[in-house]
Amino acid sequence: LLASQLSRLIFVGGSPRSGTTLVQRILDCHPEIYGGPEFDFVPLIVDLFQDMRKSIRSGRIDAILDEESLVHAFRYLLAALLSPKLQAEGVGYLSEKTPSNVLAFAWLDECAPEAKKILVFRDPRDVVSSMLEVGQRQRRRQGRAYGFVRDTVAAVDYMNQCLKAGAALAETSANCLVVYYEDMVSDPLAIGNQMYRFIGVHELNQLDLENEQFKTARNRES
């Protein structure tokens, strides 16, 4: 049952500003897929897992917990957090599109190999330019920019971190599909059907990308 629940989860990831929202919109067009706002917490869950595994291996908590039990607990946690929404929507699959999921792809492939991953690539020049535009909007609203949008070096460094993590997984995993933003823009139906085949749902004859059911994050900053 747990493996079946995990197999119904789709994680979209890539550098911020690379097109993960467009992927999510296309996925959400399919009647068997729910694509909602960003969940945010998968990378943080992975960080906690890695810290706990280090403690087990160092002998700090191995008297209480072993690695096999740790993996099972986090597999169950992932399913328990996301499956209720999937069931509430009455669909076959749930897609989660936090861009930083890409940093969790290796862990997902190891600990939840049933889950599908979709990696989004976009021309790095456009990614950095878009990041810097976000930084400019932050400065106008808040007086300063934070994180990877604060300047060109920060944007390039974070983008490269995401690209390396995604490319390393895509080269070794059969359960990771790579899509390109530019291809989605030029022919969204063709790329949509490529993703639908990868997931295992039927193809569509047309897409409604103005679907009013698509939900974005509610807070103003997002």
Image (tube, rainbow, N blue to C red):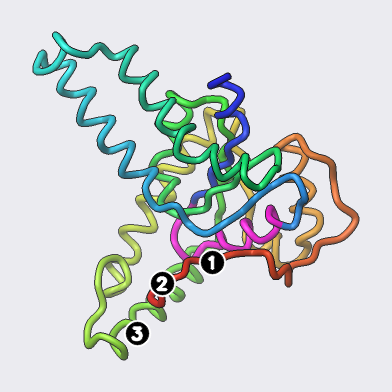
Task: Give me the C-alpha separation between circle 3 and circle 1.
Answer: 22 Å
Q: Is residue 145 toward the left or the right of residue 9 in the image?
A: left
Q: Which residue is mark 2?
A: 219
49 shown above or below 43: above
Q: Residue furthest right?
A: 205
Rendering quarter of residue 64: top left
Nearest to viewer (mark 3 / mark 1): 1
Q: Which residue is mark 3?
A: 136
Asked if disc 1 and disc 2 are in contact, CB closer than 8 Å, the reply is: no
Q: How many marks?
A: 3
| Secondary structure mostly taken by the magenta-highlighted segment of the chain | helix
Relative image position of residue 176 (x, y in whole percent): 58, 36
Q: Which residues are magenta?
A: 14-28
Q: Secondary structure at mark 2?
A: loop
Residue drawn at (33%, 58%) of the image: 158
Rendering quarter of residue 52: top left
Nearest to viewer (mark 2 / mark 3): 2
**41 or 54, which lies in front?**
41
Q: Secondary structure at mark 3?
A: helix
Relative image position of residue 74 (x, y in whole percent): 37, 27
Task: Give me the C-alpha separation between circle 2 and circle 3.
Answer: 19 Å
In primary-sequence order, the first of circles 3 and 1 is 3
Residue drawn at (29%, 14%) of the image: 67
Residue drawn at (62%, 57%) of the image: 24
Task: Give me the C-alpha separation between circle 1 and circle 2.
Answer: 9 Å
Residue type pointed to by label 3: Gln
Q: Which residue is mark 1?
A: 216
Residue type pointed to by label 2: Asn
143 shown above or below 114: below
